[in-house]
Amino acid sequence: EAGVAQSPRYKIIEKRQSVAFWCNPISGHATLYWYQQILGQGPKLLIQFQNNGVVDDSQLPKDRFSAERLKGVDSTLKIQPAKLEDSAVYLCASSWGQGLEAQYFGPGTRLLVL
Amino acid sequence: DAKTTQPPSMDCAEGRAANLPCNHSTISGNEYVYWYRQIHSQGPQYIIHGLKNNETNEMASLIITEDRKSSTLILPHATLRDTAVYYCIVRVPADSNYQLIWGAGTKLIIKP
């Protein structure tokens, strides 16, 4: 089966610009996650969707970050305006449900903010 | 904050068993232990999870101590492709949901 797809793979922007990342989860997976991974650290959950509803966005900086999953399938994460400290890898993952199931990760989008 | 403590790095010879330790002394009775790994420039990959019994699958074995305060991930015959960062994670309840709290992991280097 096809894995989690993400695009773009790399993005370089200047601070105060905006950027958007796209994720297409594994077909049939109801739960979708966005993580931020800063160099040398483990991933940090930003937002979790169950179908097209938000389950957890407690660690999402809502003044600049937004995410949507309108039809319960693919998702977009946006940063506006970007700050230097947003430089990180943004990982998308999906799973069948919210239980004990494994999360399947995409390759990530590497963002550099100058 | 992560509920797990892992050594920052380890080496293992190719063909030998790699034993990766993890301390989770504050784990609660219904919190599962998960292991993922992340090969350089890739997304994390699920390995195994368990609650209190030892678990084994095609990738690895997970040994959890009886008091559940620590666990060990065992890769029985390590290959060069097992070089990666290995994350030991405790799944914690968060409101009506569960969340994986990731630490910095152990960088495992398999040497020829």
Image: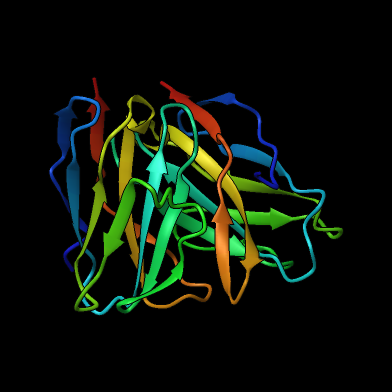
Residue A88 shown left or right of residue A6 in the figure? right
Q: Could you tell me which residue is drawn at 16 percent across and 34 percent down? A: A10
Asked where in the image residue A23 lies, by quadrant, the reply is bottom left
Q: Could you tell me which residue is drawn at 41 percent across and 27 percent down? A: A39
Measured as percent of width and height from the top left, residue A43 is found at: 45, 44
Seen from the viewer's position, the closer of residues B108 and A109 is: A109
**Where is the N terminus of chain B found, in terms of image quarters?**
top right
Q: In this view, does B6 lie above or below A114?
A: below
Measured as percent of width and height from the top left, residue A102 is found at: 44, 65
Q: Could you tell me which residue is drawn at 79 percent across and 63 percent down? A: B28
Seen from the viewer's position, the closer of residues A4 and A68 is: A68
Colour mode of the rendering: rainbow
Q: Could you tell me which residue is drawn at 16 percent across and 40 percent down? A: A9
Measured as percent of width and height from the top left, residue A72 is found at: 24, 77
Q: Which residue lies furthest to the left in this view?
A: A8
- Please tell me how many numbered marks the rendered image carries: 0
Seen from the viewer's position, the closer of residues B88 and A11 is: A11
Asked where in the image residue B112 lies, by quadrant, the reply is top left
Q: In this view, does B110 lie above or below A22?
A: above
Measured as percent of width and height from the top left, residue A63 is found at: 38, 48
Q: Which residue lies furthest to the right in this view?
A: B67
